[in-house]
Amino acid sequence: MKLLAAMVLVVGTTVGTVTPAHAVAAAPDIPVANVQAHLAELQRIATANGGNRAHGRPGYRASLDYVKAKLDAAGYQTRIHTFTASGATGYNLIADWPHGDANNVIMSGGHLDSVSRGPGINDNGSGSAGLLEVALTVSRQNLRPQNRLRFGWWGAEELGLLGSTAYVNSLTAAQRSVIKGYVNFDMIGSPNPAYFVYSSSGQPSGSQAIRQLLEQGFAAKGVQTELTSVGGRSDHAAFARAGIPIGGTFSGAEGRKTAAQAQKWGGSANVAFDRCYHQACDTTSNINATSLDRHSDVIAHALYALIGA
């Protein structure tokens, strides 16, 4: 992040023109061991490439190639969107599941780059790995959803949301109009975790429906949530500026957990949600597996509902 369950009946929630107002098949449990395996590979890539996966560094492109290979083998239509930042070529990975209405696209994403100081396993290997495993689960189930599902793994987020902004700016008005919602996952495995859901206040019409689906996913697990106003700190911002409904979850960064939050969620009060935020110690040992598991399952819960799986 840049520094700045059972059958579900969703009635009357509209995201853009997508209305998942029918019974939605229960989203699957996303195996956290698989998500952790992706994180181990991102750690291996960083270690082999100077200790990071930052924009313009070989570790970033190796990370993208790893994710792309998995998606290509799973039957996704992938493409690499390029842009230029700080004198280097940047890369976004876009992946479409080739089923469902192409005029009603639900998009989900997170940034794949790290800062230059470390491997970025929580920020944002965690969100990237959770999204990847949800995408692979969709393939394993051979879903034929009502709406089209698209994923984005963004480059150069840490330099100012550059990759996602370049992608949104590259779209024609018609291409933007088919994206009915964007859900962002930036840091989902913080070691002293929170269960934040992006506030829909001040966001484009339709954002409340996404927020409610995410809250519903955590509630089904008996997890209380808090709303957070993440403003322009992550890759949802470009989509919101384009008038696309947005939402997301967040397990916390440099902020400190309060005593009330520690009572509600466990963990340590007066300690940062992620003490290794933007540091070299953001490795695979900087991940809370329970948080990673819960947030990954909630990704699936929301996306399956939104695409009418």
Image (spheres, rainbow, N blue to C red):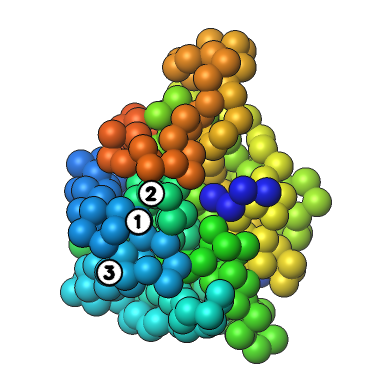
Q: Residue at x 43, y 56 (%)?
A: 116
In percent of width and height, residue 226 lies at 62, 30
The quarter of the picture where residue 235 lies is bottom right
Residue closer to the observer: 46 or 223:
46
Q: Residues within 10 Å of mark 3 (few under 14, many from 20)?
A: some
Is tag 3's residue or tag 2's residue first in the polypeptide sequence?
3
Cα gap from disc 3 to disc 1, whole angstroms: 11 Å
Q: Residue furthest right?
A: 202
Q: Which mark is residue 52?
A: 1
The residue carrying mark 3 is 62
Asked which secondary structure carries label 3, the reply is helix
Asked which secondary structure carries label 1, the reply is loop
The residue carrying mark 2 is 118
In percent of width and height, residue 129 lies at 33, 53
In percent of width and height, residue 189 lies at 40, 38
Asked which secondary structure carries label 2, the reply is loop
The quarter of the picture where residue 230 lies is top right
Q: Residue at x 69, y 86 (%)?
A: 173
Q: Which mark is residue 30?
A: none
- The answer to whether residue 53 is seen in the rendering is yes
Q: Residue at x 35, y 80 (%)?
A: 78
Cα gap from disc 2 to disc 1, whole angstroms: 5 Å
